[in-house]
Amino acid sequence: MNSNEQHTIYIVDDHDMLQIGLKNFLESKSDSKVIGTAKTIDSTKALLDSQLPDLIIIDVELANENGFDLAAYIKTTFPELKIVMYSMHDENDYILKAKELKIDGYISKASESEEFLKCIKNIYSGNSYIEERLIQNQKVIDEAMCLLTKKESLIFQEMIQGKSNAEIGKILNISKHSVEVYVTTIYEKTFCDNRTEFLSKYRFNK
């Protein structure tokens, strides 16, 4: 795209005022034109079938829906479309999910306006972007996962999503007892005494 052209954007958020505010902000502070908004996954799919923007901004939490489900669909169906996920939440399980789906950008709604613009600019330039404050949190996660086996890493990721041992067993198709054994080993490797300490250290729910 020629640098003199406007970049086109879709915004997916189930709150009208946030849609309007973000649209006005982007159009006044960047070389962006918001050409469509949506509140649901189905309405977004309809927009995408009619025209592809350069970038789509998706709220992680839509009404009764998960923005990551939409992002996964887009990455499969329109792999060239750039995606920024944004949310009121900055837990590391959200960031891990964004990395797993190869999302181009992740930023919290609590970020400074200048950082939001920095995120958009980086993605327009072909780079990925995670809010700087969240990168530090992610380093803590990465350092811990380097100590774990593949199975322990899978359980670790479910743990920081707040899943119980029974829930993890069902997800990974192993017994609750097996999960408990793995969890004990994870505690030893991460120097945690219990689940409360583990979540305080690794979930970063602020």
Image (cartoon, rainbow, N blue to C red):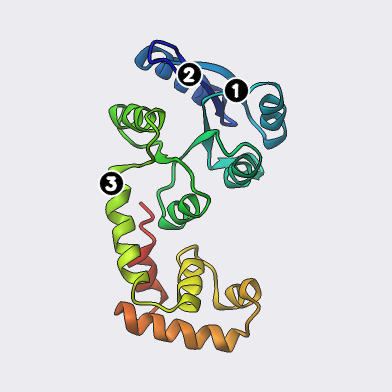
Between the residue at mark 1 and the residue at mark 3, the CA separation in whole angstroms equals 28 Å
* Quadrant of the drawing holding the N terminus: top left
Question: Mark on residue 23?
Answer: 2
The disc labelled 3 sits on which kind of residue? Arg
- Using the image as rendered, state which of residue 64 and residue 35 is in the foreground: 35
Residue found at x 42% / y 75%: 195
Left or right, 169 with respect to 206, comes to right
Q: Amino acid at mark 1?
A: Thr
Q: Badge 3 local density, few (<14 within 10 Å), some, or many (20+)?
A: few
Name the disc covering residue 37, or none.
1
The circle drawn on residue 133 is 3
Q: Is residue 84 above or below residue 201?
A: above
Q: Is residue 15 above or below residue 205?
A: above
Residue 145 position in % (x across, y down): 37, 70
Q: x, y percentage for residue 172?
A: 61, 74
Q: CA distance from mark 2 to mark 3?
A: 24 Å
